[in-house]
C-alpha cells in the first residue's frame, strides 16, 4: 500500500513539473520542446487514468496523487522562477491595473485604423 501511495505521489510531482514547464515553453514560443514534453505528459496522464480505473475506490491513491500535484506545481514554479518576468513576485504585490483609456487596448487601436 505504501509503495502504491508513493508511486502515485511521485508520478503526480513529475507530471505537474512537466505540465508547468510545458506552459512556460508555450509562452516562450518553443514549439518543438513543447511538443516533446507534452507527448510524455500525455503518456503519464494515461498511465494515471488506467491505474485509477484498476484501483477503483482507492481514495488514498487519489489523495497521494493530489498531494504530489500540489508539491510538483510548487517545485516547478520554484525551478522556473527565472523564466518569470522580473523574477519571483512579492506575495504582497498586486497585479497591474488596466487603464480605462480605450486607446490602450489593441482591439481599440484596430477599430480606430479602419
Image (spheres, helix red, strand yellow):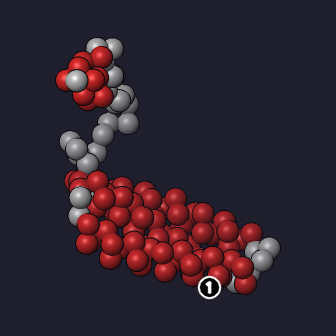
Q: Position of residue 5 (x, y in %)?
A: 63, 77
> If the image is split into quadrants, where does the N terminus sit?
bottom right
Q: Residue at x 24, y 28 (%)?
A: 110
Q: Position of residue 9 (x, y in %)?
A: 56, 73
- Per the image, label 1 sits on a secondary structure element best described as helix
**In the displayed structure, would residue 66 be above or below residue 2?**
above
Q: Is residue 107 left or right of residue 113?
A: right
Classify mark 1: residues with Cα within 10 Å, few (<14), some (14-19) or many (20+): few
Q: Is residue 73 left or right of residue 67?
A: left
**In the displayed structure, would residue 29 be above or below residue 5?**
above
Is residue 76 visible to us here? no
Which residue is nearer to you in this view: 68 or 106?
106
List the single residue furthest toward the top: 101
Q: Residue at x 42, y 64 (%)?
A: 19
Q: Is residue 84 left or right of residue 19?
A: left
List the single residue furthest toward the front: 114
Q: Residue at x 39, y 72 (%)?
A: 38
Q: What residue is shown with label 1?
A: 3
Question: Quarter-wise, where is residue 97 in the image?
Answer: top left
Number of disc labels: 1
Q: Residue at x 80, y 73 (%)?
A: 57
Is residue 20 visible to us here? yes
> If the image is split into quadrants, where does the C terminus sit?
top left
Which residue is nearer to you in this view: 53 or 93?
53
List the single residue furthest toward the right: 57
**In the displayed structure, would residue 19 be above or below residue 11?**
above
Q: Position of residue 108 (x, y in %)?
A: 28, 23
Q: Is residue 30 left or right of residue 58?
A: left
Amino acid at each position: 500500500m505504501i509503495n502504491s501511495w508513493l508511486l502515485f505521489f511521485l508520478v503526480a510531482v513529475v507530471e505537474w513539473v512537466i505540465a508547468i514547464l510545458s506552459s512556460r515553453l508555450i509562452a516562450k514560443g518553443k514549439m518543438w520542446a513543447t511538443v516533446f514534453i507534452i507527448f510524455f505528459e500525455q503518456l503519464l496522464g494515461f498511465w494515471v487514468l488506467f491505474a485509477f480505473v484498476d484501483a477503483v475506490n482507492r481514495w488514498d491513491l487519489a489523495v497521494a496523487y493530489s498531494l504530489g500535484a500540489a508539491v510538483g506545481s510548487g517545485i516547478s514554479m520554484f525551478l522556473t522562477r527565472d523564466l518569470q518576468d522580473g523574477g519571483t513576485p512579492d506575495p504582497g504585490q498586486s497585479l497591474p491595473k488596466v487603464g480605462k483609456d480605450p486607446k490602450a487596448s489593441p482591439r481599440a487601436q484596430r477599430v480606430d485604423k479602419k
